[in-house]
Amino acid sequence: MSKRKRSGITWLVTAIWGLNVVGLVGLLAGVMYFNAGGQPVSEPQILELATAGTPSPTSLPEIYYLPTITPNPLTTPIVAFTPTPLVLPDGPRPIVIGYSVSGRPLEVYVFGQGERQVMIAAGIHGGYEWNTIALADELLIYVNEHPEIIPSDVTLFVLRNINPDGDARAHTKEGRVNDHGVDLNRNFPENWQAEWDRDGCWDYAETTGGSGPGSEPETKAVVNFLSSHRVKALISYHSAALGVFPGGEPWDEDSIELAKALAKVTYYPYPPIDTGCYYTGTLADYAVSLGAAAVDMELRNHKDTDFKENLRALKVLLNWK
Ligand SMILES: [Zn+2]
């Protein structure tokens, strides 16, 4: 190693140590300056910031800001499993075909195991037409006790409550829609319309047809069920008073025949009373589109089940060819 190179290294070592000394002296001067009362950050200020909830490395914030949620005014909190539970002693357990907006089950009872499938659906207008659900329960209890009324070639499906959220909300006009404010009998994907002329139509509370055809979970459950079975005849129960409406637009021929046969044994009006309403997206229309004879049938009022009349109607349905 040459002498010249060694003197260069010595110079470099000296320079580094010199810088270190300068740095240490500067640091010492700074510390002395703050200790002498320069401009230290005072303790009370630190405490104030901490209690205001400002995040700091040593303390967790006391207040958490969460996104705000717009409450659904139609929500029906689930207190019981179903609003009006039905238990058939020694009877069949229902099949759950889907769930409502608020998570209540849609239950179908099955009797018989014949090729010919017929169906009763009740409660599509929820608590407003709660007596249709009460009727379905009375029919279920009767059929369970008298299984011999089911012909050997027939399977009977009973969907006792299509709109359990509406039934749970209120047994008044407020109970008609589901928890999205949708009239389920305007939500089916046949003749569906977003809006309709309310002249002559039910208009006692705010309703919609849904955000699209079959948008609602209750509707989807029924659509899935009907499209995966071969139901030949269907009664969708309502109340009150207008009579028996054949499904289809225009009215389907087989459904007209079914409506007439049902009107004959129940004394409900046929042709039904025309209030001038044009009905869109109904369950009966959808069932007709799948090849069933289907009707919307109205009980006499909003409180009675008309059991005797509807037992005769059930026999017409069970024997429908
Ligand atoms: Zn109705």
Image (tube, rainbow, N blue to C red):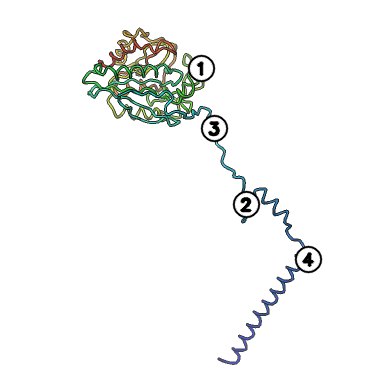
Q: Pick whichever of labels 2 and 1 is earlier in the sequence.
A: 2
Q: Amino acid at mark 4?
A: Ala
Q: Quadrant of residue 193?
A: top left
Q: Amino acid at mark 1?
A: Tyr
Q: Quadrant of residue 225?
A: top left
**51 and 244: which one is in front?**
51
Q: Amino acid at mark 2?
A: Pro
Residues packed near mark 1 inside 10 Å, few (<14), some (14 to 19) or many (20 plus): few
Numbered disc 1: secondary structure: loop
For residue 204, which numbered disc appears in the image? 1
Residue 176 located left or right of residue 283: right
Q: Pick whichever of labels 3 and 4 is earlier in the sequence.
A: 4
The answer to whether the residue labelled 2 contacts the one labelled 1, judged by CB atoms less than 8 Å apart, is no
Mark 2 vs mark 1, CA separation in Å = 53 Å
The image position of residue 106, as x and y in percent, is 38, 27
For residue 71, which numbered disc appears in the image? 3
Residues packed near mark 4 inside 10 Å, few (<14), some (14 to 19) or many (20 plus): few
Mark 4 vs mark 2, CA separation in Å = 30 Å
The image position of residue 224, as x and y in percent, is 34, 30
- The answer to whether the beta carbon of the residue marked 1 is less than 8 Å from any atom of ligand 1 is no
The answer to whether the residue labelled 4 contacts the one labelled 1, judged by CB atoms less than 8 Å apart, is no
Q: Amino acid at mark 3?
A: Pro
The answer to whether the residue labelled 3 contacts the one labelled 4, judged by CB atoms less than 8 Å apart, is no
**Which residue is under mark 4?**
36
- The answer to whether the beta carbon of the residue marked 4 is less than 8 Å from any atom of ligand 1 is no
